[in-house]
């Protein structure tokens, strides 16, 4: 995240240095409904809550046999991936917009299981998400060609990737869809024919996203797993 914040700061300074003295922006703020597109970098990881007996050996429900190893740790790993999407913006008032930003995001979910004998097993699930965020955008007053804003709302995400290669009894699998809340900050920079908005956003799933399967030793010690993400976007309108 530190590199992303540095990038945002440098980009903002670069735009401020090069922005012209025009006060237009391609009419993006003059229309009731405007459209655009976005590119983003997503950094996500699971927030894991373990069961009270998570370190106990796993007992196979079909055979009744227990694993000889004890879990030492369950560690979520950070995953990064790109995204691309569109934007539809509805102006409600002078300082309030309603935004719909459908996006395709490519990301992984990774968890490392460490056992007391030193064995480490990393479970990785590929995800191609169709995200459908709906949010309110609260804008400051425009100062020449710059405007700050903050936003908040909900996001519905649906995994469109194939799951045929996953073993439900031995892989860590997740629900196909989930709902998250999100909040963020950004800046609108106005050029002659368009505006560009660097934006940093945080999202957190509302419920457990683990797909519970009987006989799976990797989801048994996990009581809940929620997904949290940081997203840096460049939005063009």
Image (cartoon, rainbow, N blue to C red):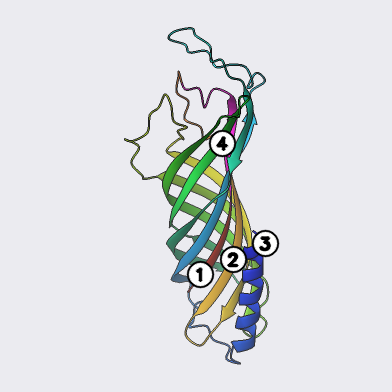
Q: Earlier in the sequence, mark 2 or mark 4?
A: 4
Dot placed on the residue nearer the N-terminal end, 1 or 2: 2
Residue 2 numbered tag: 3
Q: Position of residue 168 (x, y in %)?
A: 40, 27
Q: Nearer the viewer, mark 1 or mark 3?
A: 3
In the picture of the structure, the residue carrying the numbered disc 2 is 199
Q: Which residue is mark 1?
A: 235
Foreground label between 2 and 4: 4
Q: Secondary structure at mark 2?
A: strand
| Residue 220 belongs to the span the image colors magenta | yes
Q: Please tell me whether mark 4 sits on a helix, a strand or a loop.
A: strand
Q: Give the quadrant of residue 171.
A: top left
Residue 227: % across, % down: 56, 42
Q: Are marks 4 and 3 in contact (CB under 8 Å)?
A: no
Q: What segment is highlighted magenta in the picture?
A: 216-229
Q: Is residue 205 visible?
A: no
């Amino acid at each position: 995240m530190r590199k992303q914040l540095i990038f945002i700061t440098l980009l903002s300074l670069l735009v401020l240095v090069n922005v012209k003295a025009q006060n237009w922006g391609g009419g993006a703020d003059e229309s009731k409904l405007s459209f655009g597109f976005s590119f983003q970098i997503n950094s996500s990881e699971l927030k894991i809550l373990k069961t009270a007996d998570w370190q106990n050996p796993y007992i196979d429900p079909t055979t009744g046999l227990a694993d000889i190893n004890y879990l030492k740790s369950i560690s979520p790993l950070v995953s990064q991936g790109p995204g691309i999407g569109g934007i539809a913006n509805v102006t409600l008032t002078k300082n309030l917009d309603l935004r719909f930003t459908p996006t395709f995001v490519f990301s992984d979910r990774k968890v490392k299981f460490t056992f007391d004998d030193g064995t480490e097993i990393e479970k990785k699930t590929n995800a191609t998400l169709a995200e459908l965020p709906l949010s309110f955008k609260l804008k400051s007053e425009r100062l020449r060609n710059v405007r700050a804003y903050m936003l908040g709302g909900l996001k519905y995400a649906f995994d469109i990737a194939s799951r045929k290669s996953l073993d439900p009894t031995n892989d860590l699998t997740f629900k196909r869809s989930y709902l998250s809340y999100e909040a963020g900050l950004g800046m609108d920079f106005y050029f002659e024919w368009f505006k560009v908005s660097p934006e940093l956003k945080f999202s957190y799933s509302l419920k457990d996203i683990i797909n519970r399967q009987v006989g799976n030793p990797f989801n048994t010690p996990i009581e809940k797993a929620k997904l949290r993400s940081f997203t840096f976007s460049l939005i063009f309108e």
